Image (tube, coloured by chain):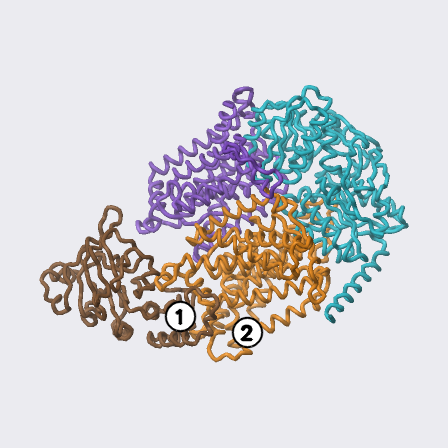
Amino acid sequence: MSNISSAQSAPGSSLFKVFRPWIFLAVLLIILPFIFSSGISVYTMNLMGIFIIFALSYNMLLGQGGMLSFGHAVYFGLGGFMSVHFMNYIEYEIFILPMFLVPIFGGIIGLIFAVIIGSFSTRRAGTVFAMISLGIGELVAASSLIFVAFFGGEEGVSGDRTMGPNVLGFDYATDVEVYYLIAIWAFITIALMYMFSRTPMGRMANAVRDNEERAEFIGYSQRKVRFISFCASGFFAGIAGGLFAINFEIVTEENLNALTSGVVLLMAYIGGVGFFIGPIIGAVVFTLLQTLLSNYTEIWQLYVGVLFVLTVMYAPQGLTGILAMHLPVIRMKRVGPLLMPYLRIGIPTIICLIGLVGLLETVHHVRSMPADQTMMSLAGLEFDTHSVLPWVIMVVFTVVGGFVAKSQAPQFREAWEEAHAPVSSDGGSAK
Amino acid sequence: MSIAISLNEVRKSFGPTEIIRGVNLNIEKGERHAIIGPNGAGKSTLFHLVSGRYNLSGGSVSLNGEEISNLPPYEIYRKGLSRSFQVTNIFPMMSVFENVRCGIMWSKDYKYSFWHLVDRERELNERTQEVLAEIGLTDRQHVPAGVLTYAEQRALEIGIASAGGADVIMLDEPTAGMSHSETDQAIALIRKITEGKTLVMVEHDMGVVFDLADRISVLVYGEIIATDTPENIRNNKAVQEAYLGAEAEHA
Amino acid sequence: MFELLFFSLLNGVVTGLLLFMLASGLTLIFSMMGVLNFAHASFYMLGAYFAYTISTYVGFWPGLILAPILVGLVGAVVERYGLRHVHRWGHVAELIFTFGLAFLIEEVVQFIWGKDTKAYQEPEVLQFALFNFFGQDFPAYKAFMLLISISIFVVLLLILTKSRIGLIIQAAITHPNMTAMLGHNVPLVFMGVFGVGAALAGVAGVIAGPALGTFPGMAVVLGPIVFVIVVVGGLGSLVGAFVASLLIGLLQTFAIALDYSVNDLLMLFNITTDADSALRDLWTLSLPQIAPLLPYLLLVLILIFRPTGLFGKRET
Amino acid sequence: MTIKSTFVAGAVFATMSAFSVQAADVVKIGFIDPLSGPFASTGTNGLAQYQFAAEELVNKKGGILDGVKFEIVPYDNKISPKESLVQLKRAIGEDVHYIVQGNSSGVANALTDAIKKHNRRNPDSRVLFLNYSAVDPALTNEKCNYWHFRFDANADIKMNALTEVIKVRDDIKKVYLIGQDYSFGKAVAKAAVTFLKQKRPDITIVGNELHPIGKVKDFTPYATKIRASGADAVITGNWGADMVGLGKAIGDTGLDIPIYTYYAANDGITKTIGEGGKDKIRLVHEGPVNPPSTPEYSAYHTAFKAKFPEKDVSQFRIANVIGMLAAAMEKAGSTKPIDVAAQLEGMEFTTLHGENVVMRAEDHQLIQPIHVSVHTNEGITFDSDNSGYGMKTEMSVAAADTALPTTCKMKRPK
């Protein structure tokens, strides 16, 4: 975080330079539905937009404030429920309000609950905070099934987004209209959250994360810093919940249960909590995994689990961290010498992975399919799971690929270090 | 009113053990005051009591005539007392620049603002650059503080403590673990940043102490046995017996 | 009424002691290594599944010994090759690692054993009613669970208070940094404690599997409760874990047994409620309905008002 | 405005392309149910039954309408309403116009609502929702809509049938109700109270308990409470692990009373309950399995077991869904949802069991004979979970006697 941000904060940067990423983002958001125009891809992008906001709000806690929460879905879900009630108020004309303003009310309810819960949970960071968030999460999720009048039980609460006054002729009957609604909100909230990280408050959140004790000796109450971050985070999570309500037109208990809290942690961590854009990448990747991977394999959750554990073990900076490690190499134009080692270690690794995935899929197929259905197709290849050859091929792939990759590892590391070695002291992001 | 810090019968116990046993001390404004004493005498504890890290078991502390006993550290800081730590205590994942800037923010009255963009605040950033120049880390400002060398981290430690312009600065062993040349630089730095301010420091290096301090207090087993000018301390029989002698034998 | 209280007490103790088997391992790991192991209940699940597979070949009894050993080995491997690696990234990363591990173990279990409930049965010799009280049976298997839990508690207590390794562990709990200075091989002690903790959870799984069902969700159902016990009992306190286990066990059974609702409470004060109001769900809220919530309520309250837990000396 | 018109053009184009595919010779039936996660076993079991029914009842016979075949397209909803809607979108994008779903009334509720809105907003690519298992009465009462058809008896109808059985058991004087704390559990409890009061005013309800769904580790305290209440019978709507736990705990306490259930069979439950539930557990369901009703059904069941030895025909209504859909298409001479819906409404049909059923026009609820069976290992032709135990029909209630009035007022397309 600090590297990227301070690099951008270098004095003398022109206005255009500052706004360039934002213009790029805006243009990207506008043209995306023209590139990916099928119904399901627009729908997937809507989902991504919602989770990007949610994951970024989560990272205000974990990445920027050092607070590990196991109950962040509470604010997301409550924001969603409040919004869907507002959608119904609009439908029954209790309020006259354009639909696109509904997420604000989601944000406000998220903020209110964050103020209440944060008032005691942010007293401490670390495990105490994590455990309180877990307990609160369980309590709220369970209450949502008990208090049917507000939460609608396990069936949830439905609404209709096409109601209310049309502004500029939008009635949100199609997903593309909803896409632009979400895109606008995503743009605004991303910008706000980014700016928040660059305010005195945002900086002190980092300081408290790094060293809560020292923060007190430069004039800041660690508790108050955490509390304000927590409230802001609840607010943005609530907005994401409101967008969820508009997109799905239904909000249920699953929006605030432990599973959703776990998913947002997963997204932020896989993406990389140390970077502002980490959770964005995480949300995009995770949504793709969830909606696409599950079309191809029933055991997709196993792959996600493996990916997550491997990320925690070997890439604590997440996917963004891996990308960022290459920045100095690219900046110094040293990509060339790295290409060959990459190929030499990459190809066997991919072969090994193909073998492993094949083995897992085939084992799963044999166990879950009827005994007479021994033919399975994998990536377009048809084969008989009861014949020996496919098994042999897959085992050979796995073993040989793994072995070659391992034998290449020292050479690769050498090349990697060589590419990085004379990095002068000011580009030390790959410490 | 010319007293900056006043300690009155300050006591601190951890469980049954009394570490600080009734310390009385007045430090005048503008003075450079050093506290010395053998290991385990309670020097750091005394620092923690004054700066709000520990709560007092008895007695009272006042800053510029105002009672600050048992206030949280940030309240004490806001009243104009800033300190450094013996064990380096910085923000390791943030850049050096950010470390210093965070140390300035409260004094520039930003408080918990989330409506200012720090990069836009010219005065804040200029002051940050000034401090960076003072502590000699201008070249290293974009590096995460956690990867600085030890001496650089010590300089940053002092920089953070002094950046906010507090009028009382407490430094806990600022030169611990430094080489000779590094120590000389540190002394020059301390001299520069405490110009016109009150300095309280704990220090083991007698060279530094006698070079910098206007007055010296000697803390032995939780009690101050003498407070005087360096000259008089050097000649004080009790001090020689209780401390300097013992120290000499050690070395 | 007496019958209800008697059996509730008995059931509460059985549940409580079962929870203690999980909590004892977790509290040891937590106190020494500072890691709240999210995957602890997953080891419990592994215990049940291992024992189920073993029981289909050689019967229940070998499984009682073999399954916990296997689980202990898995635990040791996880510590050696997973946790120790992640340790360098700090406590948050460790917590997230065990969180991911819990997720992963559940997926692996589903991959290997499938998704439906396994017919893991108590051994034939224990399928009878030990005694009959007011016409209600008390199954012998429950008594067996009680016996195993108590013997484990006693053995654990003896090891911790009488043996050399126990003293080292105790020292490590109260002064985590001191043990290394005394020249003990701390990584080995950690690996051992983690393995033994996992094995204890495995034992719990082996004996709870037949009684509470062996299915992929069994870890999720129990996992957070064990956390609650460790935090409520207090860091570094086995006694605290023991008391908290029994407390939670009894709390849950008695909350189910005692059928009181908010309405009853309000009636005491002669307040009548409107059956149609938006808060109607609150008035009809009854104790059995919220029984599984009580531990979390307790957790939050304890953390707010007494962060050291009931018996803990150090803060969580 | 130009942006808007682009959208409209896009939408028109999309629907046109969807329309042209309608004429193809495959009817895609989207199966949206859990295929991963804790409820996957129920989902995969249902999928197998759909695939088998489509193959056996339609495709093997050369299809319908001169060679139109059925294709079951599975979509994994992870039993989450949110995921179900995502998968519904995907299915619509892949030209699926028939959706079947059954697990969880919460999901069904989300789907029926989304499909209603979709059909209103996209009248050219309408979708029918064939609900084969979600039994919340609301779906064919206050929340009913024209595009939803339910092939399972709803919770009230099942309770109506169940209480017919209890009505003639004079030895039952005290009944204990226990269920999961959510809409379905509450619906079961409410129906039980209503019908028992009507049919057996002498019965006292000694307990009406709701426990949190999926969170109870050990049901022994509940069993103790049931025992202490002196109940002569238990009625529960529990399913999944909650059913297994309850059944086991009651067995362990040595209680020898009938337990009337909705879902205490198959998917591993029969096997897990085993001996402990013999002659105690009773199940209310459609489609009598033991003794076998007709040779046609026996052949169907045997063929299914030959193909899926590990699975069971646990939801006979699936065969009805496929059979009735095929019949409606034949009758309509079209595979367009709007035509098929018009035929399904009020349709009479004879099942493989030789039973006559009718899709009631006013609320789209299938009215069918309901049976109450007992869990036993005696006189079982087709067992469940390959455990030797199965459900033996004890009593049957004729279709007409199960019908209940509905409050449904649906809007029909002109």
Q: Which quadrant holds residue B7?
A: bottom left
- Residue C15 in the image, given as x and y percentages of width and height: 49, 33
Q: Which color is chain A depicted in?
A: orange
Left or right: C277 as drawn, with respect to B40: right
Image coordinates of residue B198 in percent, x first then y, are 25, 69
Task: Residue under label 1, please give it.
Answer: B101
Chain C representation colour: purple
- In the displayed structure, C112 sits above or below A265; it is above
Q: Amino acid at mark 1?
A: Arg
Dot 1 and dot 2 residues touching (CB under 8 Å)? no
Which of the chains bears the disc numbered 1? B
- Name the residue nearer the viewer: D353 or C140: D353
Is any part of residue D62 visible from this angle?
A: yes
**Quadrant of residue A101 in the image?**
bottom right
Q: Pointer 2 indicates a residue of which chain?
A: A
Q: Is residue B177 visible?
A: no
Label 1 to label 2: alpha-carbon separation:
35 Å
Q: Which mark is residue A335?
A: 2
Q: Position of residue D86 (x, y in %)?
A: 68, 55
Colour applied to chain D: cyan
SS of the residue under disc 1: helix
Classify mark 1: residues with Cα within 10 Å, few (<14), some (14-19) or many (20+).
Answer: many
Same chain check for tags 1 and 2: no
Q: Identify which residue is drawn at 75% across, 39% down.
A: D152
Q: At which x and y percent is residue C305?
A: 40, 45
* Type of the residue with mark 2: Val
Colour of the chain lettered B: brown
* Left or right for A117, reference B9: right
| Quadrant housing residue B4 | bottom left
Instruction: Categorize mark 2 by other alpha carbons within 10 Å: few (<14), some (14-19), many (20+).
Output: some
Q: Nearer the viewer, mark 1 or mark 2?
A: 1
> Which numbered marker is on residue D198?
none
